[in-house]
């Protein structure tokens, strides 16, 4: 089920850069050894040095591009991080509409049984709770939307957040089959939202 992870994989770019620098270090070690042993012809040393410099340039370019991508991803959601809760609900409704959901409606603000949005997709009806917060969403939100799903007669439930979920929320959602749509899930398609 998409969206259940708590954090995005931030280490990937760093791991690739570390690997590239390790390769550079190994090449440097070989060059140093060959120079020390005086067995390498000048052409071979030049070729190895050129390869090492190219690897450095690639590592720097890759690191810069990954940094730009991460900043751009974060900027796409920066606006929603500062929204009021009700504004976030309407943003989520528009987001779902643009992702192929139909009959998308925002419920009234109070006495909504923990459901902020009702929507349909692929013959299924969804009860969605929206949580705009700066801390991990707890299992209370999962419990509320699960109950609300039954009250509204929906077939599926989801909690949608600009952040991530607590371990307890993830465990509860797995047990009761509630979908968790976190920040990464939003970022995957944020370019489509105006």
Image: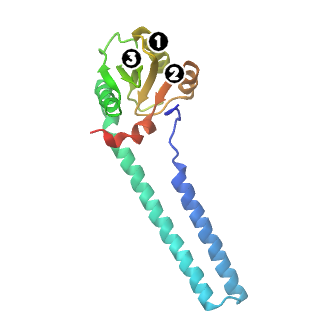
Say what secondary structure mark 1 lies in: helix
Front-most of residues 170 and 193? 193
Between the residue at mark 2 and the residue at mark 1, the CA separation in whole angstroms equals 12 Å
Question: Which label sits on residue 115?
Answer: 3
Residue 175 location, x and y as percent?
Answer: 58, 20
Q: In which quarter of the image is residue 87?
A: top left
Mark 3 in CB contact with mark 2 (< 8 angstroms) = no
Label 2 crowding class (10 Å Cα cut-off): few <14, some 14-19, many 20+? some
Q: Do the residues labelled 3 and 1 touch (CB within 8 Å)?
A: no
Q: Above or below — where is 191 with respect to 102?
A: below
**Disc 2 designates what residue?**
139
Determine which residue is flagged by label 1. 147
Q: Name which residue lies at 30% across and 15% down.
A: 109
Q: Nearer the viewer, mark 3 or mark 2?
A: 3
Which numbered disc flags the more N-terminal residue, 2 or 1?
Answer: 2
Q: Distance between the residues labelled 3 and 2?
A: 15 Å
Q: Quadrant of residue 193?
A: top left
Residue 76, horizontal then vertical, whole percent: 34, 43
Secondary structure under the numbered disc 3 in the rendered image: loop
- Quarter of the image for the C terminus: give it: top left
Q: Which residue is drawn at 53% across and 28% down?
A: 166
Residue at 45% x, 39% y is 184
- The image quadrant of residue 157 is top left
Comes first in the chain, label 3 or label 2: 3
Q: Nearer the viewer, residue 192 or 122?
A: 122
Q: How far apart are marks 3 and 1 (CA)?
A: 9 Å
Q: How many labels does the image show?
A: 3
Task: Answer with mark 3 or mark 1, whichever residue precedes in sequence.
Answer: 3
């Amino acid at each position: 089920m998409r969206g259940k992870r708590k954090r995005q994989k931030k280490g990937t770019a760093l791991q690739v850069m570390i690997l590239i620098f390790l390769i550079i270090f190994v090449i440097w070690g070989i060059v140093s050894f060959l120079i020390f042993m005086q067995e390498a012809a000048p052409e071979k040393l030049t070729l190895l040095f050129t390869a090492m410099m190219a690897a450095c340039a690639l590592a720097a370019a890759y690191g810069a591009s990954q940094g730009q991508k991460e900043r751009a991803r974060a900027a796409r959601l920066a606006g929603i991080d500062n929204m009021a809760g009700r504004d976030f609900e309407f943003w989520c409704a528009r987001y779902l509409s643009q992702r192929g959901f139909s009959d998308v409606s925002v419920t009234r603000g109070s006495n909504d049984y923990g459901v902020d949005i009702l929507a349909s997709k692929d013959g299924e009806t969804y009860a969605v709770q929206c949580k705009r917060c700066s801390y991990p969403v707890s299992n209370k939100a999962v419990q509320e939307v699960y109950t609300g799903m039954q009250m509204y007669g929906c077939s599926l439930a989801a909690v949608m957040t600009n952040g991530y979920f607590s371990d307890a929320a993830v465990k509860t959602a797995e047990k009761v089959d509630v979908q968790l749509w976190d920040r990464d899930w939003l970022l995957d398609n944020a370019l489509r939202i105006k």
